[in-house]
Image (spheres, rainbow, N blue to C red):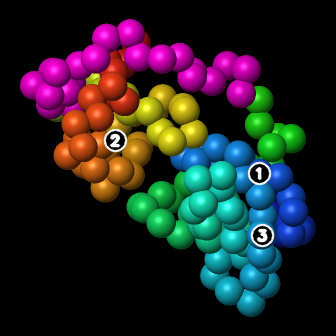
Amino acid sequence: MGYFKKAKVGDKVYGLVFGKGKIVDVLPDSHYTIMVEFPNGYQVPYTEEGVPGWGKFKKQTLFYRSDVDLSKADFSPVDKILSPKKIIRLREKNQLQVRLPSGLWTNVKKADPDYVEQLLEDEKYHLFRKKS
């Protein structure tokens, strides 16, 4: 039985990557069961288990808002902007975190590789920090 088995259009959800969202379509006869729209305009399909249809995610990244407790989540701003050299070094040592569009900090290995590469190409070094 999937987490979103009883999902309805209009249900409020929270995605670990894009933050707050709303279910805009339910697709009962498809691999992807629901379509979620986020404030940034993205519409992402999700399976019944909450796995998105983009990236290489194998675990649930979408939850009902009422089930999420963000009181212990880390949304703090970056203390020190890292140099490109330092980012590479920390990435090799698995000590680098990246800030997702939702504002959450996560290990760079758990983030979508295309997202991380785009940040590096755009020189958005303020979205990286050393693991605390």
- Residue hosting label 2: 109
Which label sits on residue 13? 1
Residue 13, horizontal then vertical, whole percent: 77, 51
Which mark is first along the chain, 1 or 2?
1
Q: Residue at x 44, y 33 (%)?
A: 99
Residue 37, horizontal then vertical, whole percent: 68, 62
Amino acid under disc 1: Val
Magenta segment = 70-91
Which mark is first along the chain, 2 or 3?
3
Describe residue 93's horizontal placement relative to residue 27 as left or right.
left
Which mark is first along the chain, 3 or 1?
1
Choose top left, top right, bottom left or bottom right for residue 6: bottom right
Residue 81, horizontal then vertical, whole percent: 28, 17
Disc 3 to disc 2, C-alpha distance: 30 Å
Disc 1 to disc 3, C-alpha distance: 11 Å
Which label sits on residue 24? 3
Describe residue 89's horizontal placement relative to residue 123 as left or right.
left
Disc 2 to disc 1, C-alpha distance: 24 Å
- Of 59 and 87, the residue lying toward us: 87
- Of 70 and 95, the residue lying toward us: 70
What secondary structure is found at the residue carrying circle 2?
loop
